[in-house]
Amino acid sequence: MLQLISKKNRLTDGQKSFGYGAFAAIGVFLNFERVNVMKVAVMGFGVVGSGVAELLKKNAPVIKENTGADLEVKRILDIRDFPDSEFAPLLTKDFCDIENDDEIEVVVETMGGLNPAFDFVSRCLKKKKHVVSSNKELVAQKGFELLKLAEENNVNFLFEASVGGGIPIIRPISRCLAGNRIDSIAGILNGTTNFIMTKMIMERTEFSDALSLAQKLGYAEKDPTADVEGLDACRKICILSSLAFGRHVYPNEVHTEGISKITLDDVEDADRFGYVIKLIAQAKKLENGKIYALVSPALVKKESMLAGVSDVFNACLVRGDMTGDILLYGKGAGASATASAVVGDIIDCADNREKRKVFGWKESVPGLIEDYRKVPVSLFVRIEGSKAEKEKVLSLLNPEKIFENSEKNEISFITDTEPEEELQKKLSLGGFKVLSSIRVTDY
Amino acid sequence: MLQLISKKNRLTDGQKSFGYGAFAAIGVFLNFERVNVMKVAVMGFGVVGSGVAELLKKNAPVIKENTGADLEVKRILDIRDFPDSEFAPLLTKDFCDIENDDEIEVVVETMGGLNPAFDFVSRCLKKKKHVVSSNKELVAQKGFELLKLAEENNVNFLFEASVGGGIPIIRPISRCLAGNRIDSIAGILNGTTNFIMTKMIMERTEFSDALSLAQKLGYAEKDPTADVEGLDACRKICILSSLAFGRHVYPNEVHTEGISKITLDDVEDADRFGYVIKLIAQAKKLENGKIYALVSPALVKKESMLAGVSDVFNACLVRGDMTGDILLYGKGAGASATASAVVGDIIDCADNREKRKVFGWKESVPGLIEDYRKVPVSLFVRIEGSKAEKEKVLSLLNPEKIFENSEKNEISFITDTEPEEELQKKLSLGGFKVLSSIRVTDY
């Protein structure tokens, strides 16, 4: 039974003295009841942070009943004042109030952005506090570093809320599917763009009108670039592929295209071929060991579960060697959904108080990411032209499906599967006036 | 730091002596490396059991890399002989070889049925071995008892594989959604019936032909009663509602109807109203604190994610107060998918070797389950008749939608939401010749 005790490597060197050991032994002897309340600090009292504080207050008895975790918010960090908040007495503007409070065992980071989040989270981990983050930018950029720091200090760094809001994604990938080899992941990971695409597909709304509506409804920000151009989805697929394939995939390595160039003509012709267009974030382990990671609009078969994901909902499809396709679906954002994911992680910290959850997430290596242009893919292409161009397409590209829209003087087709650069070469060889070229998924 | 040691309540009374404590203290002092290999026994070398053995062998390095768990199958129990199996040296017919082997820390139960599974599992728990089960009958009937026994012996009793094959369902409900109050659950939890319904919906195949096809493809057993009449789905919804609502829901308390009476006329008229018919297992916490639990065919809106679940796939929709609707989808059965769920649980045991995962699953109480007839519901009804009956339906039932099929001399309609017994009273009051009456869901 020696190992029961010897694994307590959270003890500092000073504590690892025989004196301490003997003292601890008295604890075993007397079988002291463990003090079970776990003090939590929240950094960033915005939408998610305040949601966490409220949820912990409201559902504390249920949480204790169902999981045994007894949680209490002790401190909240924010530079702003909230005089009318019920949590006002807990608020501080000084990070040191959290950093130096040894009673605080878990710190929730819902500040967003890299600075000062990275500095604060690092310092909390060094103080041997568990950290739970909902900050996708932080995890996508610094995940490996922070997990390593957590490992060195034998604490947890958890981030379920950084992808897919309240949808359980991180834990299923790292735990439930742990007996699997994950082959690929494809997700609708951004609610704003999915709302826009849904309006374009279901109601044939123009992109710009759909975007305005999303802004009016509060689904899109005034500057919608991060959503519309795929940056948000890119961060999320980086987190998921790092977890699934075990090496850090950085956002700047992932080719990213947004939906701003998608037109109703694309939507209609895709429909004709039995597809819908969605912003898909995907990652795949290639046979050469490299990773294919990409964010772009893509055609999804109407029968696919991904095609049924409407409005601001998100979904993540995980293809495993043992499980086949698994889909995890739900609200990808929103204060209460995201707060609920954060609280799930806090409960996990309470469950693993003196123990670290292992993620197989190592540093990147050179050449980890394959050049997306070299990977075989099928394209949906829309070009200007009529009979003559159609003949040329048929002879050059041998498409699976082709449609001639003589009214618009356009031809749409879906190519065979070939390396993307080969397909692009053929398109330029044909001298076609390409109006759109969108990838076709096999999900 | 006293609690670090004092929580080791897996120690026997004898070990809780000062002598042991001091000895353990030396362990802390010397910081011995913990012996990490975890020996596993498998009871039942059928499809799932052999899948687990193979998966552990094949993916052991990946599992160790990603989770830190070092797993090794030491013994396999089966009454049959497998002379040609690579695992033949591990096979035994004597349960005591597992029960009395102190090196075995985790026992996987994939025998199915109540006997001798219940006896064997109980004895393993009493020997302070963690148990992982894929046996839905065992968990649905004996879940509370076994969890209590696990609690008394401070070991884990885990059962992710008992519902939904390789789909992560149990863990998300008990962990990821732990910060939530779960309001209701609705699932397509039986692949066989979903395959049959898919054939009826997509290809307008008659029930009996679809069943024959399912049998031919190996999706349905020779005696398909347990699947077709909803018993299998009933066991699964019992497990899920016990977990979600915290009290054991027993299979004999859940009103269960199968799909054998569904006709193509039902499918067609449901289609006309914008619905598909699925076998839905559902559970809901009512405002009076009681639980509404039911397995029956039900109309699902075509836009619902549940409607998109085709063929043998399963899905479980969880409605939480914080998360909104979450859907977990995938292959609900099959050796490798189920084995992968079992292995996920084994890894969890390795992660929680000296610690028990708490489920909020208590014994049932009298009056826990509400009489389903008293719960408001909307019904899809098909009756014989024409104009006169239509008038009567309109005046008596004020339906939301109505359709007169004069060719077949039939009327179909969807009622308002009222307690089911009130609706049935009105139907009998009208003296209608009711051909079908199927519940309409709001999922």
Image (cartoon, coloured by chain):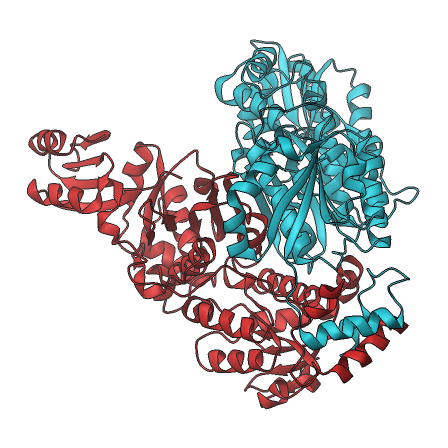
Chain colours: A cyan, B red
* Nearest to the observer: residue A148 or residue B1: B1
Say above or below: A268 vs B392: above
Residue at point 41% right, 66% down? Answer: B363
For residue B34, side relative to residue B54 (left or right): right
Q: If the image is split into quadrants, where does the N terminus of chain B sit? A: bottom right
Say above or below: A73 vs B171: above
Q: Is residue B323 visible?
A: yes
* Nearest to the observer: residue A330 or residue A365: A330
Q: How many marks?
A: 0
For residue A220, side relative to residue A151 (left or right): left
Q: Position of residue B117 (x, y in %)?
A: 49, 79
Say above or below: A380 vs A323: above
For residue A239, side relative to residue B195 (left or right): right
Q: Position of residue A53 (x, y in %)?
A: 60, 37
Residue at point 48% right, 42% down? Answer: B320
* Nearest to the observer: residue B224 or residue A92: A92
Q: If the image is split into quadrants, where does the C terminus of chain B sit? A: top left
Which quadrant of the structure image shows residue A433? top right
Q: Is residue A304 visible?
A: no
* Nearest to the observer: residue A269 or residue A285: A285
Q: Position of residue B224 (x, y in %)?
A: 37, 65
Say above or below: A228 vs A144: above
